[in-house]
Image: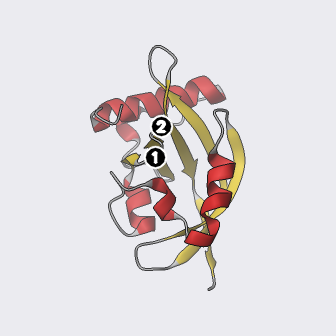
Amino acid sequence: MTSLDPGEWRRLIAASYALALGEELCAPDDLDDFSGVVLCHDTAADPVFVYANQAAVRLWQRPLLGTPSRLTAPPEARSERAAALNSQTVVRGYTGVRIAASGRRFRILDATVWPVTDEQGTVCGQAAVFDSTEPVEG
């Protein structure tokens, strides 16, 4: 399902958030400029990002579309990341270490992760939103 255009991914992300959490994140057309980081990867065996808003691009210091999502975590944190995100339910309060293109490490704080579903209810991705990070030394 990675062949969807960005507008369709925005619509599915916003609609799935409202369905899963019972509240609106924002209008689909506002996701690109949303103040918090919003990301979504697909359901491939090695998931790749199919959506990343401008806040995500600034945080990771690079475009993320098409990037395997595991590569946003340092190697020593990838198994922990995979285990934490290997869920088809809503996860609130997720925290994990990530690495920017520059090598700068940071910890995501209090993220919400949810399954992204299409009109038939088929899971086609997993999205996350957060607005807090802290630096990680080392």
Q: Hey, what amino acid is under mark 1?
A: Pro
Do the numbered discs 1 and 2 sit on residues whose CB atoms are within 8 Å? yes
Find the residue positioned furthest to the top: 120
Tell me the tag on residue 43: 2
Tell me where residue 11 sits by quadrant: top left
Find the residue positioned furthest to the right: 93
User: Picture coordinates of residue 17 (x, y %)?
Assistant: 56, 31
Residue topped by disc 1: 47
Number of numbered tags placed on the structure image: 2
The local crowd at label 1, few if under 14, some if 14 to 19, many if 20 or more residues have their Cα within 10 Å, is: some
> Helix or strand or loop: what does disc 2 sit on?
loop
Tell me where residue 105 sits by quadrant: bottom right
Q: CA distance from mark 1 to mark 2?
A: 6 Å
In the displayed structure, 21 sits above or below 65; it is: above
Quarter containing the C terminus: bottom right
The local crowd at label 2, few if under 14, some if 14 to 19, many if 20 or more residues have their Cα within 10 Å, is: some
User: Picture coordinates of residue 23 (x, y %)?
Assistant: 61, 29
Quarter containing the N terminus: top left
Tell me where residue 109 sits by quadrant: bottom right
Q: Is residue 109 visible?
A: no
Q: Residue at x 51, y 58 (%)?
A: 70
Tell me the tag on residue 56: none
Q: Hey, what amino acid is under mark 2?
A: Thr
Its colouring scheme is secondary structure
> Helix or strand or loop: what does disc 1 sit on?
loop
Q: 24 or 83: nearer the eye?
A: 83
User: Picture coordinates of residue 18 (x, y %)?
Assistant: 57, 27
Q: 127 or 23: nearer the eye?
A: 127
| 33 horizontally vs 23: left or right | left
